[in-house]
Amino acid sequence: MNPRARLLLGALLAVLLLLPAFASNYVISVATLILYFAFTGQAWNVMMGFAGQLSLGHSLYVGVGAYVAAAMFVNLGIGPWLGLWVAILVCMALGAAIGFLAFRFGISGVYFALLTIAFAEFTRVGFDHLQWTGGSGGLFLKVAQREQMDLLNFRGPPAMYYYAILALAAGALALCAWLLRSRAGYYWQAIRENEEAAQALGINTFRYKMFAVLISSAMTAVSGVFFAFYYNNLFPEQIFHISRSIEIILGPIIGGIGTLFGPVLGAFVLTVLADGITELLALFGVEVPGVKQVFYGVVLLGVVMFLPNGIWPSLAKKIGVGK
Amino acid sequence: MSALLEIEGLDLYYGDAQALSEVSLSVDEGRIVAIVGANGAGKSSLIRTIAGIEKPRGGKVRFKGKDITGFESHATCNLGIGQVAEGRQIFPTLSVTENLEMGGLLPRAKSKARQTLEEVFAMFPRLAERRNQLAGTMSGGEQQMLAIGRCLMGQPELIMFDEPSLGLAPTIVQEVFRIIRALNARGMTILLVEQNVAVSLKISSTAYVLENGRIVMSGSGESLLHDDRVRQAYLGL
């Protein structure tokens, strides 16, 4: 990282840290959403951007992570700090199952993506009928007292959730920066570029693809737990839905697949502009359902046509910072 | 002279289709051994099985006297079996140097990677000139040299070449074969799989003819070159 990049990153972090001091609750909720998508997008990026394994079913890990921690909390009275680890382990086990099935039997590319969708879909159907978690009727957490901060049960004011997701997003960025420079990062690059060649060079492609899936699923489980305790309600039809998986991957695609900062930038652009358009239309008294989706489509189309590598690589060049 | 690589009765199937049938051969240390045959004879399958990418149903593969049948490819590479895969298979969006470094990450080669990189650049001045260029933007011949250089980064004791002349201009093909001989002159053992039968037989000490997954003929390169059946079937004479 060059000095300029360091400075900009420091400034950004300072602004984000001080944000709750002067911003309204609305701004904080938007910022929380941005950081949530930045974190989840980063998790997805480990699999697709780093190791070249396309998952179109990341809602699986968000949903299972959310449900495991929430159900333990609601039904068993076990707090989220323990539930978090159980959620991570369950999601890693699911990731391992998908990865093992796919990589052992040579399923790759589009077929791998289909497998990830299938897992998310049948999990959705499963949770629809699982009465312990409320079935299709949903699972609800008692809404947090906004004034009281209860860190032990992860209940509290919006600023608490904001700082939590800020820490997660920053931590994910640091983790990914480290991973990219590690041996695994090199191997992933080789696998992504040309798996056949990677194998011929003696890279254990099975092990390193599994490693990417495990890291990605563990990270996404954490974002699921956050989701559950932030939104307080879970419905299988929503959380496991494929549109959720697509929502997760739009940020990294628009920001720049495989880049460190792309998921963050993509989450920012999408959330701010989508919210902005909704607000703008509301200002004129127009309420168009689905305007967000149309907007996503237009932005995606524009990026694919004019910036096929995403916004970040060209922006990074313009402001003079490295990848 | 001892056999570096020995193969005994190797059987390979893709589903129900048999790709290799009781293939036996041996590669002596310091030699060039050629396997020639038509398209689809099983040449690439044989290399991929030795490398550990395909798993044989029967037979044995021994390297330096050690049974390595069924080993994964990362294990065979780390024992010193290098491979220059068919169609070059470089990493197109990485630079020449990055491509080479990727070949030197094997545990057996890692500590010597920096030194080997300089040796490779000395052997291939073209690569040194282009060390920061993206590999995908180079010519086919340069990419082939990069693939060979990358293989050398892994400190192999045996290099398996899979169709190194594929898709290259005739002058470049000559250059590639010159490189193979030069490597051999430095003591490298080479297993060469080729459709270019004439040249392969000329430079090899031992050669095997593979047809429909079976070895149908073997002998010194020179003797096969003058064999009437080989001349008719593969050299069109």
Image: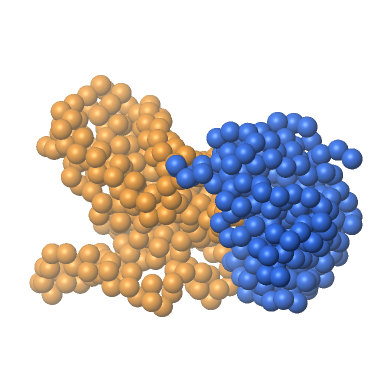
Chain colours: A orange, B blue
Does B164 sit above or below residue B133? above
The number of discs equals 0
In the rendered image, the residue lying farthest to the front is B228
Q: Is residue A29 left or right of residue B85?
A: left
Tell me the residue at 69%/76% (across/down): B169
Q: Nearer the viewer, residue A143 or A54?
A: A54
Q: Is residue A23 left or right of residue B224?
A: left
Residue B208 location (% of width, % of height): 72, 51
Q: Nearer the viewer, residue A308 or B195?
A: B195
Tell me the residue at 28%/26% (across/down): A72
Q: Nearer the viewer, residue A199 or B83?
A: B83
Tell me the residue at 86%/65% (across/down): B122
Residue B125 falls in image quadrant: bottom right
Residue B134 falls in image quadrant: bottom right
Residue A53 location (% of width, % of height): 45, 51
Is residue B103 in sight in this rendering? no
Tell me the residue at 51%/69% (across/down): A313
Q: Is residue A44 left or right of residue B237?
A: left
Is residue A100 in sight in this rendering? yes
